[in-house]
Amino acid sequence: MTSIIIPEIEEGIEKILLVQWYKQPGDYITVGESLAKFSCEGIEFDLFSEKEGTLKELNVAEDTIVKIGDLICYLDSGDAISEELLKEVEKQETMEDKEPIENVTSLAEKNNIDSSIYLMNKNEEQVLFSPDSQTVPVSAISMTYKEVRSLISHLYQSAEETFFKDEASFFQDIKKMLRSRWVYMNNGNIIYDHNIAAVFPYRKYYELMDEDFDYKKHLDVSGFKGDAMTREEAAKSFNTTDHPVYKRILTLDDYSVSKNPSISRIFANQTNSSKSIAFKSHGYDIQSYDVVNQKNNLLGKGFFVPVFRLNEENAFEINDRKALQLWLENRLVPSGLSAERQKEYDYLLELYQLKELDHESFLKELPSIAIDSNTFYEKLLNSEKVRADIDTYDEKMLTDPNRGHWDLWPVTSDEKPLTIKLNEEIMARNPKMDIREDGIVGIDFGTKSTVVVHQEESDFTLPMRIGVGYHNTEVQDWHYENPTVIEFIDLAHFLELYQEKEGRPDTRWQDVTVSHNALNNLMNGKSDHYYSILNNLKQWAGEKNNELRLKDKRGYAVVLRSFLDLTDQEINPIELYAYYLGLYINNQNNGIYLDYTLSFR
């Protein structure tokens, strides 16, 4: 907590009038921002804040006489870099002898969210079961490398959706940290500056640049390949003498020759001049920036502080969510998080790193990979919700001995060399048990709409709803006139997931949608998204030499040849529409139908 007092104004002045508060408790104050208006002998003037933080308490009301030295309010600097934190850095004996960036504590060591589910290379024992069983309890699941990668990506996406929400306590703490602007990173002697989305080295010394200085030999930023700042970056970052690197330079300049001769030589003849920061201009030319007077100092020397940009050159407008993603991308671990937030950050970072690993590195990391069990179970229960916006299965499916989940059914195969070890037994269901032996499905594939009906053990026929999603919603007649429409949102990502597995791929409804949802988006969408929606599917399929151009909402464009000319390797909208029909027909609510009658003129 910082106390704000009335500073000395002029000799002989002991009292002044506080006229107006510009800020109120809870407001965030930046350096140089006006706090209040004062008046003395008919002259009005403002008091500017020399600190940054949240205004916590006002000790003086408006229209009150105050004395020089009176306490008028408090500022809470929150998670700003403290002197204690910076002194802790100085205890380190060398500038670059530090833990490598890669040495981020693994989930197996630090994550307390739930680290009881692990991956391993081979099954420890085979699960014995009859192929004619209806359900079996399982404590391990075999997977391919692609399936594990897909699972890791899903877990990261789920964690990101949880932690990146504005109302999430985790993200609130990250935002508060970013409001302090400077964030010290634990895994290197570096400080992040949110003003320019970059990190600086926090060193035992900084080079004093002169006319012969070759900055290209001094670009290391604790293992990162840095660069010289631009003039704009120098002005944006060193816009205050409270900059922790600048304060460090001032401190080092006070060393005497007897304490540290090498440092004294570096800072020779600078005791009576303003300290300037070197920056590059016109390619590789070096100039210096006067921090105190906030202007270029073309003739003066400057201390060279390399910078590693997380985003790009002169990236001044970057939101908090993007900053957090850049931290993860560069394996940065912020200091100042609570123990609980630190565990959550480590979990997020571990998943981010895993999904980016190459095949060889991924195998090396297997023994230490731990998975959040609750998120894994949610993935199972939301399998149809994610694929086709169908109702989420209830939790009892995994524990009821008479139910179980299809995706858990054991498959013995050399192509599934990885195993997930579960912390408890859950129920797997044999998909064969849900085949509708006497069932038949009829599909009328129409120009504007497609009708799907099913029949079982009798002449009684029932229609099915496609692309409506929630089976517990009130039934409307139009639900059964399923529009023959496909919407392409992120086609490239859909195809990547679609081709990962031969059966029940983990595709996402938000990448490609069909039927009612697609038609609704066509009727209410923007005109520039027109080519992302295919509403003449049957006409295209029925005509020869009919090329069709598609462009999804992300800008990915493809040209479809006529239906009769397509090969198995090309995108086939008929196949994709049929895939979604199959998801709505065959699921654990309806069972599995093997007999179909198709009407297609």
Image: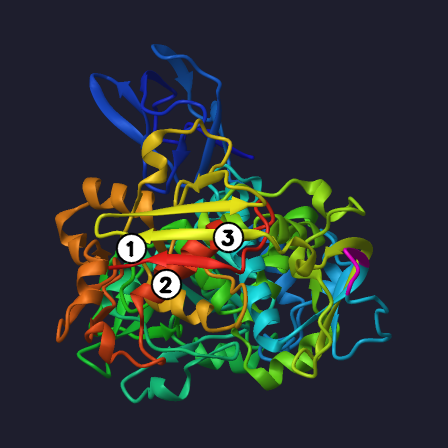
- Residue 134 on the magenta span: yes
| Residue 80 appears in the figure | no
Q: Amino acid at mark 3?
A: Ile
| Residue receiving disc 2 | 576
Q: Is 71 situated above or below 503? A: above
Image quadrant for the C terminus?
Answer: bottom left
Quadrant location of residue 10? top left
The mark nearer the N terminus, 3 or 2, is 3
Of the numbered discs 1 and 2, the one sitting upstream in the chain is 1
Magenta residue span: 132-137
Cα separation between marks 3 and 2: 21 Å
Mark drawn on residue 440: 3
Seen from this angle, which residue lies furthest front? 459
> CA gap, disc 1 to disc 2?
9 Å
Quick check: 393 left or right of 417? left
Work out whether residue 365 or residue 102 is closer to the camera in this orientation and state it. Answer: 365
Q: Are marks 1 and 2 in contact (CB under 8 Å)?
A: yes
Q: Residue at x 31, y 64 (%)?
A: 574
Q: Amino acid at mark 2?
A: Leu
Choose top left, top right, bottom left or bottom right for residue 541: bottom left
The residue that disc 1 covers is 486
Question: Horizontal and vertical percent for residue 173?
Answer: 54, 43
Q: Residues within 10 Å of mark 1 (few under 14, many from 20)?
A: many
Of the pair 422 and 570, the residue shown nearer to us? 570
Judge from the rendering whether residue 588 lies leftward or rightward of residue 136; answer left or right: left
